[in-house]
Image (cartoon, grey):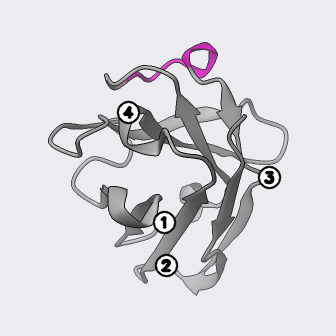
Amino acid sequence: QVQLVEAGGGLVQTGGSLRLSCVASGHSFSSYAMGWFRQAPGKEREFGASINSSGGLAYYADSVKGRFTISRDNAKNTVYLQMNSLKLEDMGVYYCAARTRSSVSSKRSDYAYWGQGTQVTVSS
C-alpha cells in the first residue's frame, strides 16, 4: 500500500507560480512512475504531467506544456510540480498519483494510488 500526501496548494494571481509536492510512503517509490492530475469544479479529473521512475522522462498535457515542470527526488520519496504562468483555467484540486510501473502514462486508470488532493485557486 502506498500513501500519497500533497502539499503546496493555495491562492495565486494569474501569471504567478506555485510549487506542489507529494510525499509517498513505502519502499517502492523509486520503481513507480508518478503523475499529477487536476479536477476543476463540475469537470472530470484530467491529466497534467507524468514522470518515469528514474526521473529521466517527463510527459505533459498540451494545456500545461512549457509552463509546468514535473520532477522527483527518489531519495526523499517526493514528486514535485512547478507551476508557472498560472491561468484561471489551471484552478482546481490537484492530485498526485502513483502507478506500479516505471513508464509514464496519461491515463487515470493506469494509476493505482491517489492522494487526497490540494486546492489551487487562481485569481484575476
Q: Amino acid at mark 4?
A: Ser
For label 4, the residue is: 31
Between 116 and 120, the one lying in front of the other is: 116
Residue 94, image x and y in percent?
64, 54
Could you tell me which residue is drawn at 42 percent across and 20 percent down?
101
Q: Amino acid at mark 1?
A: Lys
For label 1, the residue is: 87
Separation (CA) of disc 1 from disc 3: 23 Å
Could you tell me which residue is drawn at 27 percent across and 47 percent down?
65
Residue 6, image x and y in percent?
65, 63
Q: Secondary structure at mark 3?
A: loop
Give the label, 1 or 3, closer to the camera: 3
Is mark 1 in CB contact (under 8 Å) with mark 2? yes
For label 3, the residue is: 116
Give the label, 2 or 3, closer to the camera: 3
On whether residue 106 falls in the magenta region, the answer is yes
Please identify the quadrant where the N terminus is shown. Answer: top right
Could you tell which of marks 1 and 3 lies nearer the N-terminus?
A: 1
Separation (CA) of disc 4 from disc 1: 33 Å
Look at the image and give the residue range highlighted in magenta: 105-110
For label 2, the residue is: 14
